[in-house]
Amino acid sequence: MGRVLNFVVAASFILLGLFAIVEPTVAGLAAAILIGWLLLIGGVAHIVGAFFIDRHGWARAWTVILGALYSASGLFFIRHPLMGLGTLTLFLSAVLIAEAAVRLVIYLKLRHAGASAWIVANALITLFLGVMIWARWPASAVWAVGMMTGVNLLMTGLFRMMPSVRPVGIRTF
C-alpha cells in the first residue's frame, strides 16, 4: 500500500510540475498568493504571541511591529499578486546570484583539495540564470517563479517515483 501511495503522490507532483511549466504565470501567481497568506498568518501569530509570551516593554512592541509588517506584506501579496510576483522574482534572482557566489568561493577554498570542476559549472549556470532573470525584470516575473516551481515539482515527483518503480522481471524477496 505504501508503494502505491508513494506512486500516486509522485505522479501528482509530476502532473503539477508539468502544469506549472506549461502555465508559469498561473503557477507564479499561485505561489505569490500562497506566500501572502503565509506572511499574513505569520504576522497575526507574531501579534497574538506578543501578548502570550513573557515579553515586556520594547520587546513586546517590536514583536507587534514585526507582526504588523508581516501582515501588511501578506495583505499586499494577496491583494496585488502580480506585483508580489515581481518582488518574488527579484528575490529569486538575488538568491541565485548569491548562491553562485557562494559556490565559487567554496570551489576556490577547496580546489587544492580536489574540488570538482562541476562546482564551477554549477556556479556559472546559476549565476547566468540569476543575472538573466534580473536583467529581464519585470518581464521575467511572468515566467521565472512559475517555471522554477514547475521544474522543482517535476523533479521532486520523478525522484519520489524512482523507489516505487521496480524493473520488470526482477523479483524481490
Image: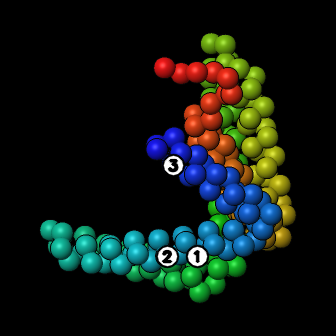
Q: Circles 2 and 1: CB distance less than 8 Å? A: yes
Q: Position of residue 109 (x, y in %)?
A: 62, 23
The quadrant holding residue 103 is top right
Res. 101 in view: yes
Q: Position of residue 12 (x, y in %)?
A: 62, 56
Q: Residue furthest left?
A: 54
What is the crowding at mark 2: few (fewer than 14 residues within 10 Å), some, or many (at least 20)?
some
Q: Is residue 43 left or right of residue 163?
A: left
Under mark 1, the amino acid is: Ile
Q: Which residue is rendered at x = 63% and y = 21% of the image?
A: 170
The quadrant holding residue 16 is bottom right
Q: Position of residue 97 (x, y in %)?
A: 70, 48
Q: Which residue is rendered at x = 56% and y = 52% of the image?
A: 9
Under mark 3, the amino acid is: Leu
Label 2 secondary element = helix
90 and 48: which is toward the camera: 48
Give the label, 2 or 3, closer to the camera: 3
**Label 1, label 3: how far apart the Cα atoms are:** 29 Å
- The residue beneath circle 1 is 33
Label 3 secondary element = helix
What is the crowding at mark 3: few (fewer than 14 residues within 10 Å), some, or many (at least 20)?
few
Q: Is residue 108 left or right of residue 127?
A: left
- Mark sitting earlier along the chain (1/3): 3
The mark found on residue 168 in the picture is none
User: Does 109 sit above or below residue 102?
Assistant: above
User: Does 150 sit above or below residue 67?
Assistant: above
Under mark 2, the amino acid is: Trp
- The residue beneath circle 3 is 5
**Label 2, label 3: how far apart the Cα atoms are:** 29 Å
109 and 89: which is toward the camera: 89
- The residue beneath circle 2 is 37
